[in-house]
Image (cartoon, helix red, strand yellow):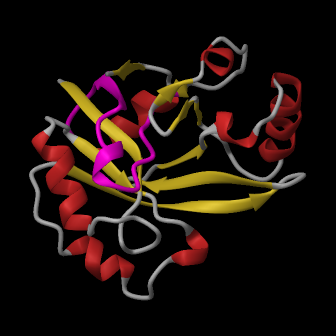
Amino acid sequence: MLLKGCLHTHTTCSDGKLSPQEVANAYESKGYDFIAFTDHDYLLKKNYMDVYRQVKTDMIIFYGIELSVFVNGNIHVSKIKGDNDVLHIFNHIGEYNFTPKQLLARLAELEKMFPLDAVEITTKGYREIVFEELNIAYPKIASDDSHARVGIGRAWIELDAKREKDSIIRAIKAGKSWNCYI
C-alpha cells in the first residue's frame, strides 16, 4: 500500500503553534497517512502523552521525541516508537551550518551514541542538495519539521508498506522510501 507521511512535527506540547489535534487535522487534510509527533525533549509539557493519545484521526500517529544531543555542539535526533521497533533519525542536517566534512565527523560521533537509522536532509521542508548528494550509509528522508501551519506539507516521504507502524519503520530503515517536495 502506498503511504505518505511526515516523521518530524512539533505541537503546543513543546514549541509548536498548533495543538496535536490541529497538527493531525492539517496533515490529514493534505492526504497524509502517518505522522510522528516529535516535540523537543527539553520543552515537553508534563502531560504530553495524555494530550497525544486524545487525538482523533484516521492517520497512524507515531509518538516520538526530538532529543538534544551534544556532539561538538547541539544536534537533534528523533527517537520514534513503533509497536515494537524504534527509529532514530539525525534531524535537519543542513541547519547546523556544517560543511559535509564536519557533518561526517559529527555523524561518526553520533553513531557511537545511537543506533541511527536515517538522516533528515531537509531544512524546514526545503531541499538541501549538498546533503542530498552526500555519500552516507543511511537512508535520506525529507520532512517539513513543522512548527506552524505554514510549514505543513512542504516535504514528505512516501513508501510502499502495510498500514502499520512497524512495517513503516522497517521500510524506512531498509531505504525503501522516497522523498517528495512541493
* Above or below, comparing residue 14 to residue 131 in the picture: below
User: Is residue 74 shown above or below 51?
Assistant: above
The residue positioned 11% from the left and 57% from the top of the image is 57
Is residue 107 on the magenta stretch?
A: no
Q: Quadrant of the N terminus?
A: top left
Figure disc tally = 0
Q: Is residue 153 magenta?
A: yes
Q: Residue at x 50, y 21 (%)?
A: 175
| Residue lying at 79% horizontally and 37% vertically, measured from the top left | 107
108 or 115, nearer to the observer = 108
Q: Residue furthest front?
A: 150
Q: Is residue 109 left or right of residue 28?
A: right
Residue 181's quadrant in the figure?
A: top left
Q: Is residue 52 left or right of residue 122?
A: left
Q: Residue at x 49, y 77 (%)?
A: 44
Highlighted range, magenta: 141-163
